[in-house]
Amino acid sequence: MSSFILVDTNIWHFAMVKPIEEEFLEIHKRANSFLLSTLMDENIRMALSSYQVAEVLEVLRRSYVDFDTRMKLLADLKTRKFYVAEGSFHTVEEAIRDSFESGIHVYDYLVAYPLKGVVTRIYSADDHFQHAHFFKMAEVVNPLFPWILREGVKPRKTQR
């Protein structure tokens, strides 16, 4: 039996890009191990929104991941292991409305909302995904706990 999961962009990024700062090597190792084991598990299928595909590839480009590696990933995303969902204008409207309500930037919603009814679990180290909007659509798990990774903010460990 196949299950669909969403792996947030921050995990893809830390798994594929070794940080310069020694203090964040633990995050890289844990993210890399998690992503590799997930990719190797034949019983798990991964789902991404088309927006997230672009986001992951852009984050990797900005981190100087070479073109061939990024194009290989893009080709892999077309295989049976992955399901890519298109976002509709209705989904964008819903994302904007919920973003306004929560104060969380719209991009997290654009990653997740096209996958409503598809994914049963969201893996993210971004504490934005701990908001009730995301828990309504799937279980949310931080596989890098206690690390919190939020775009544009230095990674930190949580106290809880």
Image (tube, rainbow, N blue to C red):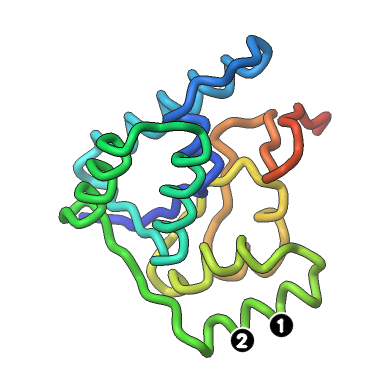
The residue that mark 1 highlights is 97
Answer left or right for 89 relative to 48.
right
With respect to residue 43, does 40 lie above or below?
above
User: As shown in the figure, which amino acid type bears the numbered disc 1?
Assistant: Arg
The residue that mark 2 highlights is 93
Residue lying at the far top in this picture: please name it.
22
Answer left or right for 150 relative to 66.
right
Q: Quadrant of the C terminus?
A: top right
Residue shown at 76%/29% (left/top)? 156
With respect to residue 70, does 114 lie above or below?
below
Residue 50: x and y, percent?
39, 66
Element under disc 2: helix
Residue shown at 44%/69% (left/top)? 115
With respect to residue 159, does 133 lie above or below?
below
Spatial distance from mark 2 to mark 1, Cα to Cα? 6 Å
Crowding near pointer 2: few (<14 within 10 Å), some, many (20+)? few
